[in-house]
Amino acid sequence: MNNPRKPNRFAAKRKRMQALGQLAPRFGIAIGPQFPMGSDYSVVLPFRRSPVVILISGVFLAIFALPLLSVVGGVTGQLEDNLFSLVAFLFGLFWALGWSVGVFILAAVFLAVTFGRETLAVKDSELILRIGFPMFGFGARYSPALIRNFRRQQPDEVTGTGWRGEHLAFDYAGDTIGFGSAIGGAQAQQMLDRLEQLFPQSNDPLPQLPKVEIAPVGKEKAEIQHATLDPFAQEESIRWHSMSSLALIAANLFPLFGILFLDWEIGEIMLLFWAESAVIGFYNLLKMAQLASWAILFYGPFFVGHYGGFMVGHLLFIYAFFGDNLAEGADISISELVADMLRLAPALLGFFLSHGISYFTNFRGRHEYIGRNVGAQMGQPYKRIIIMHITIIFGGFLVMLLETALPALLLLIVLKLSADLRAHLKEHGNPTQP
């Protein structure tokens, strides 16, 4: 017997709110005074504190903070002038950056349950609820058009309001929004009377909202919205002769100049393609920032930490297998690494411009961000980079085996260009392969 999967309550709520369009709650972080200037009404709400919750959150914070402090103490030691010391330093630094996101969240929770407060304000007919501190808060703004039924509410463990005790609530487009904690008696009634004065329509029936179909996610959703939002929607999909594709081809052919005129060998080529991965990560961070808005404060450090650790490990791999072409001795100094990167700077600039053209003409210009999820975008560069580097590592070993520098290096460039162009066309929705 097949049991239908129970829908995720939070996912369903998120879709309902997204369907409201401009009437959806606007979430954000407020730094500075938590009550907007000229508010029609503002109040610090009672905030119930639990010693058990404070103790548990403090213990979790200590458990997660100790490894971070240990690693930070290790990486701040003396950095020796060799590649392996640099790799260890950078790997520890990136690990600490990624781990710090979890520590920061736990610290915020601990401070909120220990010293935090909840505020309510009304300005320009919007209701603003925030949880935070006197100069910092996180919360949402609610449109008066959908606010209904202010009331006192009993705690409910099932819906997660048990910690509040008796509190206040209102309905918003079919969802219950609770605020305050341990509010009862005259104080609760006084606040309800004031809110009903500020929102006189709160006791009226909810207006009939236009029926909104939840758009499909992913590629189908992007195609639907491209038809109305994208001025390039009627153009063909990205092909090999599109501007971003031609820029990518030109950037991939630039190493030929180094091979033919600057005596580049396999080591320089592999290091250049490694550095291109950093360029891809940089533009992916910009894409995440557009998708996540203020949440990039959390997603960004985690991505940089994880992706940076991946890059550092890859650098060690490159020097381990192809380092003989880059340095005379096994112990490569940091100055040698810097000199290698400076020699590759013009070619690396070509890759930076190529991926920049793709970012501005495709992701932003063609509105490819529509329908994308920041979590999925965070993992986007890994698949492309892994396929690309499997190709060039295979080609690199082929160069070393053939021992005929120029023909083998040309073959490596062709292999890498083919893998990169195919990945580019696939990423930007080309239905056919060149």
Image: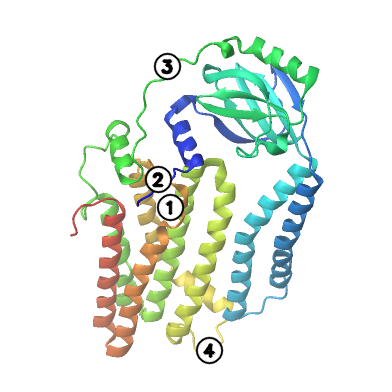
Residue bearing mark 1: 376
Asked if residue 36 shows in the view, the reply is no
Q: Which of marks 1 and 4 is nearer the N terminus?
A: 4
* Circle nearer the N terminus (3, 2): 3
Q: What quarter of the picture does the C terminus occupy?
A: bottom left
Is label 4 or label 2 in front?
2
Q: How crowded is mark 3: few (under 14 residues within 10 Å), some or many (20 or more)?
A: few
Q: Residue 330: give x, y in percent of width and height.
A: 53, 89
- Give me the disc on residue 208: 3
Q: Nearer the viewer, residue 338 or 210?
A: 210
Which residue in the protein does label 2 denote? 372
Colouring convention used in this rendered image of the protein: rainbow
Look at the numbered disc 3 and give the secondary structure of its residue: loop
Residue found at x 79% / y 49% = 52
Which one is in front in this view, the residue at disc 3 or the one at disc 4?
3
Q: Quadrant of residue 354?
A: bottom left
User: Where does the image place residue 43, in percent across and percent down from the top left?
Assistant: 75, 23
Depth check, front residue: 240 or 127 = 127
Q: How far apart are marks 3 and 2 (CA)?
A: 30 Å
